[in-house]
Image (cartoon, helix red, strand yellow):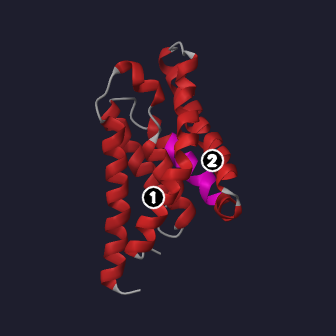
Amino acid sequence: MSLNQNNRSRLVIALTFLAALFLSILPGPESARPFRPDWVTLVLIYWCMATPQRVGVGVGWTVGLILDVLYGSLLGQQALAETLVAFLTLKLHLRMRMFPRWQQAVTVLVLVAISHLVVLWISDLVAHTPVHWSYWTSSIVSMLIWPWLFIILRDVRRRARVS
């Protein structure tokens, strides 16, 4: 792979994470907040699955720290959750590639729910915050968004020749 192709691949991956970060902080009505998909985690799962040699635990940690800063949460809280998701995705990526899209979506539901569970666990250790059932709807919405996001990111990866 040439140096120019390598730089272009990095740029494409970085831009998709930047778009996911932007969608995560995009303002909207407070009533719609529980129905917002976990964009960054979805993009992380895709890239860990598609290019495990490029995107891994380090990238998960980095985007998690950026999320901590953007959300104003406890530093390291999102980072730990995203790192765990990246690790689990890397362990499962060969199997996930073989799954039909609906089965990938169920796996994504589990991974996003694990991420939310880690964040909830840390929040509970620090502040004992009560949680409403709507906290988990983001995981379900992420599962429903996954097939379309997968197709879009796969098309972006193929057009940019990211490998």
The quadrant in which the N terminus is found is bottom left
Local packing at callout 1 (Cα closer than 10 Å; few below 14, some 14-19, many 20+) is few
Secondary element under disc 2, as helix, strand or loop, is helix
Residue 36: where, in percent of width, then height? 44, 33
Residue 12's place in the image compared with 8, above or below, is above
**In this view of the protein, which residue sits in the foreground, 129 or 45?**
45
Q: Is residue 92 left or right of residue 154?
A: right
Residue 161's place in the image compared with 148, above or below, is below
Q: Is residue 56 visible?
A: no
Q: Residue at x 44, y 56 (%)?
A: 59
**In this view of the protein, which residue sits in the foreground, 152 or 163?**
152
Q: Which residues are magenta?
A: 81-91
Which numbered disc flags the more N-terminal residue, 1 or 2? 2
User: Which labelled disc corresponds to residue 135?
Assistant: none
Q: Residue at x 56, y 51 (%)?
A: 147
- Measured in 3D between alpha carbons, the distance from the residue under mark 1 to the one under mark 2, in whole angstroms, is 15 Å
Q: Is residue 65 visible?
A: yes
Question: Which residue is under mark 2?
Answer: 105
Question: Is 54 a magenta residue?
Answer: no
Residue 121: where, in percent of width, then height? 57, 26
Quadrant of residue 91 in the image?
bottom right
Quadrant of residue 21 in the image?
top left
Residue 128: where, in percent of width, then height? 52, 14
Question: Is 82 a magenta residue?
Answer: yes
Q: Residue at x 47, y 39 (%)?
A: 38
User: Which labelled disc corresponds to residue 152?
Assistant: 1
Identity, as a three-letter code, of the amino acid under mark 2: Ala
Secondary element under disc 1, as helix, strand or loop, is helix
Q: Residue at x 46, y 52 (%)?
A: 43
Furthest-bottom residue in view? 2
Identity, as a three-letter code, of the amino acid under mark 1: Ile
Residue 46's place in the image compared with 53, above or below, is above
